[in-house]
Image (tube, rainbow, N blue to C red):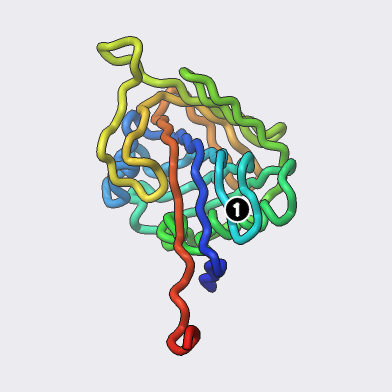
Amino acid sequence: MSLTVPAGGWHASGLLFENCNCTVVCPGHTHFSQNCTHERCVGLWAVRVDEGAWEDVDLAGVRAVVAYDSPQRMIDGGWTEAIVLDGGAQPAQREAMERILTGASGGPWEVLDRFVGRRLPTRVESIRIDDEASLKRVAVEGLLEGAVEPIRGRDRSRPVTLQNMFNQIHAPEQVIARGSSRYADGTLSFENQGTHGLWSHFRWRVDAPAPERGEDA
């Protein structure tokens, strides 16, 4: 994949939540070298951009889903991955999000792209994301239904969280949850029930490339 970062760089921030078939917390989420609960780890990430820009393209409000199937030890690679982009977005917004989520423009998803062995054709569908204090839900008619709910802690007014957690795409503070999801696109399919889930408010950024020598002379 050729890496093309726009002249002004790009940035995006918003809501990111996930569900896979592991028990809580997914070992692969902690580090890709850890063995996941089952022989295959299958699940999804749901993305809602609240603020962002790629060149002069405003990304605010754009939604996307990334579904995947990976080996038990995720670092071994060979993942199958499918991207679903927001049918309500403008073509330029979808193009920018596809470049971000495939890692073609650098950033955290470039790291994840190293493990993808098979990338299914990108789909464009109407994506619904509901964001409530105690429930995050994603739906694509005929393709996907998913939701995650926080695990209750000692203080019932606050969710259980991971703090100072290193993860390529999530924020350092993450809410631990249980989730369920069903996904089927004809090639990749899974059904999870009461398994690993979490969410965070991500911040992704790639700065503008440094000028080539002599360019400012």
Residue 50 place in picture, x, y as percent: 56, 39
Please give the name of the residue rendered at 65% of the width and 31% of the height, measured from the top-left corner.
128
Q: Does residue 78 appear anywhere in the picture? A: no
128 to the left or right of 161? right
Please give the name of the residue rendered at 47% of the width and 89% of the height, measured from the top-left corner.
217
**7 and 107: which one is in front?**
7
Q: What is the secondary structure assignment of the residue under circle 1?
A: helix
**36 and 94: which one is in front?**
94
Q: In this view, does 5 lie above or below 177?
A: below
Residue 152 place in picture, x, y as percent: 34, 15
Q: Residues within 10 Å of mark 1 (few under 14, many from 20)?
A: many
Residue 191 place in picture, x, y as percent: 53, 31
Please give the name of the residue rendered at 59% of the width and 30% of the height, measured from the top-left corner.
138
Total marks shown come to 1
Q: In this view, does 57 lie above or below 217?
A: above
State the image quarter where residue 144 is shown. Answer: top right
Q: Does residue 86 appear anywhere in the picture? A: yes
State the image quarter where residue 77 is shown. Answer: bottom left
Please give the name of the residue rendered at 41% of the width and 27% of the height, measured from the top-left corner.
195
169 to the left or right of 82? left
Residue 93 place in picture, x, y as percent: 67, 52
128 to the left or right of 196? right
Amino acid beneath label 1: Met
**Residue linked to disc 1:** 97
Q: Is residue 130 above or below residue 59?
A: above
